[in-house]
Image (tube, helix red, strand yellow):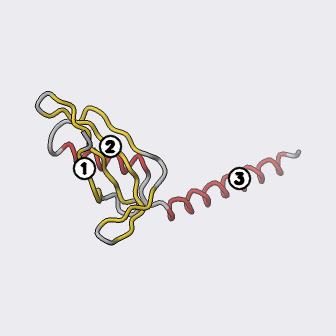
Amino acid sequence: MSKRNMILAAGLGAAAGYLAKEAIDAYQKVTPEKALKHAKETFKKNGPISGSWIYMKPEEVEKNGLLFRAYRGGVTRTVDGENKQYEFYVDTETGAVIDSKQTS
């Protein structure tokens, strides 16, 4: 393979990768990592967090008759010497926490 063909193939590969990334970003506005970071910031307003997790695959969630695509995750906080766990849903479009509840 000549140098010209190798450079052309590398350029086309880079362009295809860039276009694929842009298409994914347009479909998925908020990444799971950003969603978890935003949720942790929200929970930290009420005290320190000792652990957190998030599912990487969005789910369909109904809240007050509205349908959302959301990431499901959770945080653990220490309250009065006890670990309390909270589960939450973060909207994939806006990154806003749309629901949370204490699970233990």
Identity of the residue drawn at 40% across and 63% down: 93
Name the amino acid type tagged 2.
Answer: Gly
Query: In the rendered view, does 93 fall on the left or right side of 5?
Result: left
Q: Distance between the residues labelled 3 and 1?
A: 45 Å
Identity of the residue drawn at 41% across and 46% down: 33
The residue pinned by badge 2 equals: 74
Identity of the residue drawn at 33% across and 38% down: 52
Marks 3 and 2 in Cβ contact (< 8 Å): no
| Labels 1 and 2: the sequence-earlier one | 2
Marks 3 and 1 in Cβ contact (< 8 Å): no
Q: Where is residue 74 in the image (x, y as percent from the top left)?
A: 32, 43
The residue pinned by badge 1 equals: 101
| Labels 3 and 1: the sequence-earlier one | 3
Classed neighbour count for the residue bearing mark 3: other residues with Cα under 10 Å, few (<14), some (14–19), many (≥20): few
Name the amino acid type tagged 1.
Answer: Lys
Q: Helix or strand or loop: what does disc 2 sit on? A: strand
Classed neighbour count for the residue bearing mark 1: other residues with Cα under 10 Å, few (<14), some (14–19), many (≥20): few
